[in-house]
Image (cartoon, grey):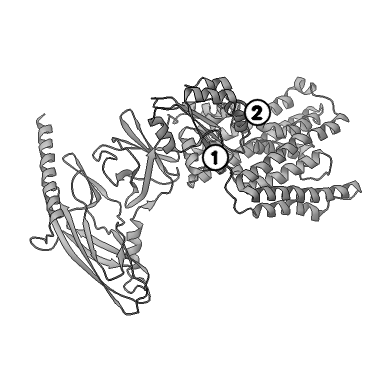
């Protein structure tokens, strides 16, 4: 008890002493009482001869005396931030805020101070007026009042600093010093973070690629009432997030500096929202559970609506398999290899992009309208092939066996299936994005395995294979019938191109169909005359769609969605503060399972009536274009993509995550 009392008295004395010194600084211009100042300061320009109209950076080269320290823009529990008053030539202006290097922490008697104990250099930005003649002098003066302290005493000081510049050729000066000083200034992090109060703790989640090195991380708030300055900060990595748990009760946006290394920091901000806490993923159990979920999810994809467009390829492939056991097994293994390789390749690309800071998820490639244009060409080519308009090696794998054809069929099946996310799959892929990369790739491989399981069963179980229809003339008729769902897929992709890129996407989608149809029809006519398809036409079949896709450099805004307000974390927070129940769903135009749920369960009269009766607010997060803010929110709920359905009951601290296959009754029961 005595020790605590002594510590409290020391803290009180230091706080009172600092307050008195700070008050003196705020109300008087004081020169050092004796000798030189404890903070030696010099104004250093990055150009002594700036051009008229040029911006000049002025460094406040500050060197603390040994044992003394100066204060950051937010001093913490004690201290006082420096105050500056510029006297500048007519027309010259200075930005109101300095750029401060990353501070260090100093805990004295339970009081947290944000200080500099080693040499440092805040940067000021000055704007030189335009129209000045060469040789014009620019006298600049700076009056600075500040507090300088040791561990036991604080002294208010004031200095009058001067700098004379001359209008000239803009030549740089002190380049080496400015390289070092600028490197110490925190770099802005464009991606917003999220914070949430959980169990009396403030949990702050900052998006940061897993590959980024972090050392001695700490968060320094720009202002008061954000975090408790002296509270410990528990820092953990969670995949592409940095989590900081501390004490605090903010009421709005949090902004400050995140230290990620010695003299290295990021300027960050965070808004109130939901922060999903990481689970224990250190053992094999989490990886195996995610792998099993991916296998089940891939298996279910075979009966999900998003796989319907490739059922034609599967049916023809199986029907042509015959009764040759070795050929059937080769086909099955080839299909497995293709599906697994495609899933692993897509998963590896996702992990690589996320490591680079992109908030991408499953089916990210369909967020680019240029990829959609290429898919229009591919699916229309397969449609014409199934309709018997031509026979060329490009889509030949769709109707012929062999190892190479099976690998290509499996790869195409996996690629076209990416817009879907079914039961088990969403949670499994969400876990994969925060697992170590070898385990993550294994989970993506599990998805390909699940997608290929039906083919494996038929290839290795003779009784199943014998149950298939025998090859015959019916196959040609069936082949033409199966061109219909592929043609519907083409129309769906054209619609998607229009939704993503407006009229430009629609016109280029139609142009791709016309150009592809002309090229392939010409090749088909040559084949009917007993000639080859033609190298020039084969080359054109590849180059023309690629050129049309490359021409799609931008797009218009898409029509607004109906059925709910546009999702934002701010809007969600407002509705929850009002005590409203909220149903938030996240969708994309390329997500076929999303559209099925919307048509069958969400956008129905029964659901609308139930929501109106129970006053359930609806928020729609449209991820068609890969909005990174939505991507981070989806990731925070351990999902790798859409659909994601969340229900926030009034007063609940966490949302209820609904299944990825909805029913009208499930939504009508929300209250």
Q: Which residue is mark 1?
A: 623
Task: Classify 10 Å Cα crowding around label 1: few (below 14), some (14-19), many (20 and above).
Answer: many
View extreme (left): residue:
34
* Residue at figure coordinates x 80%, y 41% from the top left: 385
Question: From the viewer's perspective, is 141 left or right of 428?
Answer: left
In this rendering, the answer to whether 619 lies above or below 29 is: above
Splitting the image into 4 quarters, where does residue 342 fall? top right
Q: Name the quarter where the N terminus is drawn.
A: top left
Q: What residue appears at the point 61 percent right and 42 percent down from the top-left corner?
A: 366
Up the image or down, 280 lies above or below 153; here it is above
Question: Is residue 608 shown left or right of residue 261?
Answer: right
In the image, residue 281 lies at what x, y percent? 45, 30
Label 1 vs 2, first from the N-terminus: 2
Question: Which of these two is toward me, 222 or 431?
Answer: 222
- Residue drawn 47% across the image and 39% down it: 632
In the displayed structure, 453 sits above or below 640; it is above
* Place of residue 479 in the rendered image (x, y in percent of width and height, measured from the top left): 81, 34
Q: Is residue 401 visible?
A: no
Which residue has dot 2 on it?
304
Viewer-proximal residue, 74 or 586? Answer: 586
Q: Is residue 428 visible?
A: yes
């Amino acid at each position: 008890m005595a020790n605590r009392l002594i510590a409290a008295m020391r803290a009180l004395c230091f706080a009172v002493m600092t307050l008195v010194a700070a008050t003196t600084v705020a109300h008087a211009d004081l020169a050092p009482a004796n000798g030189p100042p404890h903070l030696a300061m010099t104004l250093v320009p990055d150009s002594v001869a700036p051009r008229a109209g040029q911006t000049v950076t002025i460094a406040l080269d500050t060197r603390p005396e040994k044992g003394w320290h100066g204060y950051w823009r937010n001093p913490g529990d004690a201290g006082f931030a420096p105050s500056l008053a510029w006297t500048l030539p007519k027309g010259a202006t200075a930005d109101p805020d300095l750029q401060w290097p990353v501070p260090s922490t100093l805990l004295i008697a339970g009081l947290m101070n944000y200080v500099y104990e080693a040499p440092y250099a805040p940067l000021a930005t000055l704007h030189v007026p335009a129209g000045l003649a060469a040789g014009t002098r620019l006298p600049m003066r700076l009056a600075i009042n500040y507090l300088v302290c040791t561990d036991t005493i604080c002294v208010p000081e004031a200095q009058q600093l001067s700098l004379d510049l001359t209008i000239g050729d803009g030549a740089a000066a002190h380049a080496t010093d400015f390289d070092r000083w600028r490197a110490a200034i925190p770099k802005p992090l464009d991606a917003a973070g999220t914070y949430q109060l959980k169990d009396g703790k403030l949990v702050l989640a900052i998006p940061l690629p897993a590959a980024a090195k972090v050392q001695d991380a700490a968060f320094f708030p720009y202002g008061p009432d954000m975090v408790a300055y002296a509270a410990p900060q528990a820092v953990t990595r969670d995949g592409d997030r940095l989590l900081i748990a501390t004490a605090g009760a903010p009421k709005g946006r949090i902004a400050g500096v995140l230290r990620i290394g010695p003299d290295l920091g990021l300027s960050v901000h965070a808004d109130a929202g939901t922060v999903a806490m990481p689970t224990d993923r250190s053992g094999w159990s989490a990886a195996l559970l995610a792998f099993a979920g991916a296998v089940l999810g891939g298996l279910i994809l075979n009966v999900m609506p998003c796989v319907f467009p490739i059922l034609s390829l599967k049916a023809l492939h199986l029907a042509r398999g015959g009764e040759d056991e070795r050929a059937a097994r080769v086909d099955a293994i080839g299909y497995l290899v293709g599906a697994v390789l495609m899933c692993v390749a897509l998963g590896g690309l996702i992990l690589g992009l996320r490591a680079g800071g992109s908030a991408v998820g499953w089916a990210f490639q369909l967020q680019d309208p240029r990829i959609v244009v290429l898919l229009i060409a591919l699916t229309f080519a397969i449609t014409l092939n199934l309709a018997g308009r031509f026979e060329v090696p490009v889509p030949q794998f769709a109707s012929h066996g062999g190892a190479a054809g099976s690998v290509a069929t499996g790869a195409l099946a996996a690629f076209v299936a990416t817009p879907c996310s079914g039961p088990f799959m969403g949670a499994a892929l969400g876990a994969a994005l925060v697992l170590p990369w070898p385990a993550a790739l294994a989970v993506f491989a599990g998805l390909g395995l699940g997608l290929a399981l039906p083919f494996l069963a038929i290839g290795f179980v003779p009784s199943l294979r014998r149950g298939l229809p025998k090859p015959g003339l019916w196959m040609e008729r069936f082949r033409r019938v199966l061109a219909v769902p592929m043609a519907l897929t083409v129309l769906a992709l054209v619609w998607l191109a229009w939704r993503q890129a407006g009229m430009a996407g629609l016109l280029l989608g139609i142009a791709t169909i016309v150009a592809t149809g002309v090229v392939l029809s010409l090749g088909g006519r040559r084949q009917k005359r007993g000639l080859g398809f033609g190298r020039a036409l084969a080359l054109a079949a590849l180059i023309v769609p690629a050129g049309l896709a490359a021409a799609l450099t931008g797009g218009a805004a898409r029509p607004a969605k109906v059925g709910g307000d546009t999702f934002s974390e701010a809007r969600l927070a407002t509705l929850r503060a009002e005590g409203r129940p909220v149903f938030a769903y996240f969708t994309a135009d390329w997500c076929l399972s999303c559209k099925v749920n919307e048509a069958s369960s969400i956008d129905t009269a029964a659901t609308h009536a139930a929501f109106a009766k129970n006053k359930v607010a609806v928020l729609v997060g449209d991820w068609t274009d890969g909005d990174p803010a939505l991507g981070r929110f989806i990731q925070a709920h351990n999902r790798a993509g859409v659909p994601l359905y969340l229900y926030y009951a009034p007063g609940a601290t966490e949302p209820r995550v609904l299944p990825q296959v909805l029913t009208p009754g499930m939504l009508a029961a929300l209250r």
